[in-house]
């Protein structure tokens, strides 16, 4: 199985901050990396597919980059509605594993 | 608008079998997508369970492979998850989702259903 490691596991930040979450794959997954946002009691929401493709309706303050084994999700200016958990997922091969998640909290 | 809705029992006895159904509207499960199941134990992260393609091809998580079956019924536009030999470790919120045919990203999700394994 491909192991996905996110860092940090938790992060405290303020509205307006720029934050970056990192996801590393245990082997080359090309660009098959997706990012999801999950709020408490809700289903995950796809933000970015194939490393950098922003989904329709997702604010442009979200961006993704990377390839092979190293990927990042960046939020350029945190808004109150961005405080949530974020998960990366590799879709290169099965099982399509998720990272352990990053909980973004208000400082 | 694509919508997915899980249904099934909220409580399963240990060693029992879970069957969940995902009703799809706004899309046909006969179209070229991967219809998927993901679960999340309370307070923990996401675990991919498996997927079924419109052609009937299935992929499963090896950690569950001996216990899991995913099937689809085009006549009712639903797909199902069957997980046997349930234990407390299978207590989780179970989500159904649609996977893109080219990159397998999960673009639409059901709201999730909590399944508790307890006697």
Image (cartoon, rainbow, N blue to C red):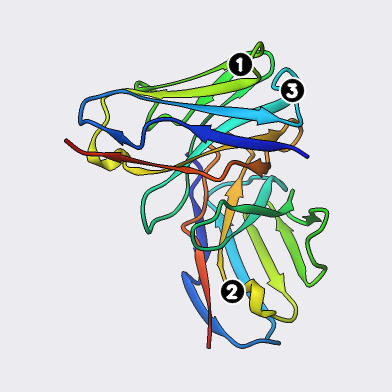
Q: Residues within 10 Å of mark 1 (few under 14, many from 20)?
A: few
Q: CA distance from mark 2 to mark 3?
A: 34 Å
Q: Are marks 1 and 3 on the same chain?
A: yes
Circle 1/circle 2 CB separation < 8 Å:
no
- Where does residue B91 sit, x and y in percent of width and height? 32, 42
Q: Residues within 10 Å of mark 2 (few under 14, many from 20)?
A: many
Q: Which numbered disc, 1 or 3, marks the residue closer to the eye? A: 3
Give the quadrant of the N terminus of chain B.
top right
Q: Which numbered disc, 1 or 2, marks the residue closer to the eye? A: 2
- Where does residue B108 sit, x and y in percent of width and height? 68, 42
- Where does residue A23 sit, x and y in percent of width and height? 58, 61
The residue that label 3 is drawn on is: B28
Dividing the picture into quarters, in which one does residue A37 lie? bottom right
Residue B57 - label:
1
Give the quadrant of the C terminus of chain B.
top left
User: In the picture shown, does residue A47 fall above or below B13?
Assistant: below
The residue that label 2 is drawn on is: A83
Q: Are marks 2 and 3 on the same chain?
A: no
Q: Is residue A59 left or right of residue B85?
A: right
Q: Which numbered disc, 2 or 3, marks the residue closer to the eye? A: 3
Q: CA distance from mark 1 to mark 3?
A: 16 Å
Chain-order first, disc 1 or disc 3 = 3
Residue drawn at x 69%, y 45% as measured from the top left: A32
Dividing the picture into quarters, in which one does residue B118 lie? top left
Is residue B23 or residue A32 the one in the foreground? B23
Q: Secondary structure at mark 3?
A: loop
Is residue A16 or residue B110 the one in the foreground? B110
Residue drawn at x 74%, y 23% as measured from the top left: B28
């Amino acid at each position: 199985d491909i192991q996905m490691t996110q860092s940090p596991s938790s992060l405290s930040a303020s509205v307006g901050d720029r934050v970056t979450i990192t996801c590393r794959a245990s082997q080359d997954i090309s660009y098959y990396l997706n990012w999801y946002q999950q709020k408490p009691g809700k289903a995950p929401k796809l933000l970015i597919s194939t490393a950098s493709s922003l989904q329709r309706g997702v604010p442009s303050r979200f961006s993704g980059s990377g390839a092979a084994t190293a990927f990042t999700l960046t939020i350029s200016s945190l808004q109150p509605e961005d405080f949530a958990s974020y998960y990366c997922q590799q879709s290169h091969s099965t099982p399509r594993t998720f990272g352990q998640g990053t909980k973004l909290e208000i400082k | 608008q694509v919508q997915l809705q899980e249904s099934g029992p909220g409580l399963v006895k240990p060693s029992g079998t879970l069957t969940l159904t995902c009703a799809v509207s706004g899309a046909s499960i006969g179209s070229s997508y991967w219809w998927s199941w993901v679960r999340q134990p309370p307070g923990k992260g996401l675990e991919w369970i498996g997927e079924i393609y419109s052609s009937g091809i299935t992929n499963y998580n090896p950690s569950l492979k001996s216990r899991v079956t995913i099937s689809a019924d085009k006549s009712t536009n639903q797909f199902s998850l069957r997980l046997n030999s349930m234990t407390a470790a299978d207590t989780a919120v179970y989500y159904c989702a649609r996977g893109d045919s080219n990159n397998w990203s999960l673009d639409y999700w059901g709201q999730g259903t909590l399944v508790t394994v307890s006697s």
